[in-house]
Image: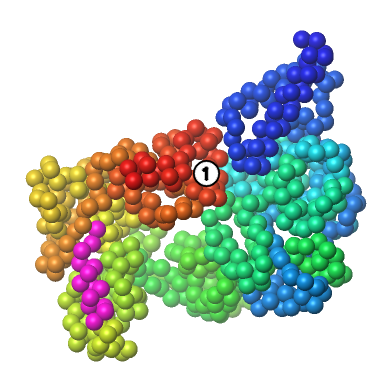
Amino acid sequence: MDQNEAKKRINLLSNKIRDLNYKYFVLDQSEVNEPVRDSLKRELIELETAFPELIEPDSPTQRVGSALSGRFKKVKHITPKKSLADVFNAEEIEEWYKRVKKLASGKIEFVCELKIDGLNITLQYEKGLLKRALTRGNGIMGEQVTHTIKTIRSIPLRLREEIDLEVSGEVFMPLDSFNNLNKKQTKKGLATFANPRNAAAGTVRQLDPKVASSRNLEMFSYHIDKTSLQGIDSQSKALTKIKQLGLKTCDKSKKLSSIKEVINFCHQWHDKREKLPYEIDGIVIKVNDFAQQKKMGFTAKAPRYAIAYKFPAQQATSKILDVIFQVGRTGAITPVAVMQPTLVAGSTVSRATLHNEDEIQKKDVRIGDSVIIQKAGDVIPEVVEVIKDLRTGKEKALAFPENCPVCESRLIRKEGDSAYRCTNPNCYAIEREKTIHFVSKKGFDIDGLGEKVVIQLIENGLIQKPIDIFHLKRDDLLSLELFKDKRADNLLQAIQESKKVPLERFLFALGVRYLGEQSSYDFAKFLYSHRKQSKITDEFTLLDLIETTKALKLEDIINIDGIGEKVGQTLYEYFQDEHNLQDLKDYHQAGIKLITDNLKTDGNLTGQSFVLTGSLTDLTRDQAKNLIKQHGGKVHSQLTNDTTYLIAGEKAGSKLKKAQEKNIKVINESAFRKMLGS
């Protein structure tokens, strides 16, 4: 091949790879498999090696350059970078809206964008070619980090139009990449990163671009600072154009017509953000129309037309006033810090778990310490760190109790166990927690019988353990405070209806240590499959359950698919205990009926495993999972080499990309329905 032929081939390969990269990294569309794209790139590398004079600076092979030898060059931004003013609640959003209404006439529309927790970067293109990438710096001068930014595959080295453009966005590290990076750091004996933002910032500032290339950074672009484009008169149009040019944008942005919709959008993403494959810390709210933005102008530090709504802090500081010890349903003793009330994650917190004795010693927690507490979603607040610089010398060390704080029985800690446990199986606190677990949503799910009512029943001597619930009388309930005729009748009706319970939920409700929701289902399915072998009648009763489990050997249970050694050991011990078997007989006498309709041992999906991602149209996640199980399939939360199908709904996450990389078949909700025969 001569030079002319090589040049033509290089141009063809470069254009094709750019197009494939655009579809894959920006549009999330896979025209070819990963090995195909890699093969094209290898051919391009071979040609450029043979004809180095034909290598263009925007070639897809030129993402990783040479390591820098020193500090980064400071470069002046073409357009000064402004910060956004922060707001923290709906009232402050409405106050901002009142201000902007006074500054511009006509109807105001908004664009809401997820506030990515990353590093602000500005990209400068000349005639479509990437010339430099700058950090925000002080807003006037930024650090040139082009060498590492070029390693981000979703950033085009050449735009899809030959224009001048300065565009800003956020560079971030997806959560999967962050977790993998910390695993590698740990294996090498190196310090781990505290969070994805720190990891992204540290990666961008690496002198060696090969390090950045290995860490899988991403960038969402969201603001055109300066351009030779015409006709872009709103933020929504700007986002569309940015994507058309080949840059990746966040697909969660939305144009809204009222401030009420804006506030709802903020609240919705506060609840949904845990499902994202990257971290966000708020919502950016912008006036959509550029003409209105211009009228509103800027303050000395920030634009008036945009604000950043910040989610309630996940961490806060407080002071430990005391430490109490609680008893759980398995008898485990948990130390709990009693603290000065403080606002964290949107609620006032006055207690936080210290987990166990080892954690107390590891963190050196003392009464009187100032500490950092953390709360995420519905997770119990925890003490994550002591601020030792704030110690006065008056703090008191903690002594773990030798006896149960409720029944005063001796506490023991078995070898390999992280918790001390109460040795009294009839401890009041254990029975209370067992009963609360028994009636929980994933157990008997008795409407009107929540934790507070359970405690009220126990404290008034009406029940001592779960079985007593099924012997409650109307007069018992009417003797309780706030219980009137209708409420009592409704609760008794709910208790009666709960007597028909799926076998897997009954097993979960028993509170066997380590037995979770999925393993309860796996064990229930195994028991159901033994019906024919045990010559059990069509109705699977609690007496059948006793007979089946008593006959099982330890190795039989351990070898059940989905159970394993730890869960198997506790299940075996539970069903060999005569007290537990008597409890099962008592439930039978109380009229508990086991439902096994959804435990088919075969079906359309037998031998197949599924993972779900995105939002389904006609089904909730739980409904889809139940249908899979009912038809003989398995549901897993993560993709593995054994996964048969990924069911992808709207706005599918990173699992879709992983499934395509692993050649796992991806189906939509309609195809899933057809598999079920519906």
> Would you identify the image quadrant in which residue 281 lies?
bottom right
**Residue 166 location (% of width, % of height):** 84, 48
Q: Examine the rendering and report whether any part of residue 171 can be seen.
A: no
At 30% from the left edge and 67% from the top edge, which residue is drawn? Answer: 445
Residue position for label 1: 655
Q: Quarter of the image containing the N terminus?
A: top right
Which residue lies most toward the front here?
A: 106
At 66% from the left edge and 70% from the top edge, which residue is drawn? Answer: 258
Q: Examine the rendering and report whether any part of residue 87 can be seen.
A: yes
Q: How many marks?
A: 1
Amino acid on which disc 1 is placed: Lys
Asked if residue 464 is positioned above or below residue 2 in the image, the reply reads below
**Residue 404 location (% of width, % of height):** 33, 73
**Residue 618 location (% of width, % of height):** 43, 54
> Would you identify the image quadrant in which residue 509 lies?
bottom left
Dominant SS of magenta comes to helix
Which one is nearer the viewer's eye here, 604 or 674? Answer: 674
- Report whether 28 appears left or right of 641: right
Instruction: State the extent of the magenta-drawn residues as a range.
Output: 489-502
**Residue 650 location (% of width, % of height):** 52, 50
Which one is nearer the viewer's eye here, 175 or 261? Answer: 261
- Report whether 503 appears left or right of 266: left
Asked if residue 57 is positioned above or below residue 478 in the image, the reply reads above
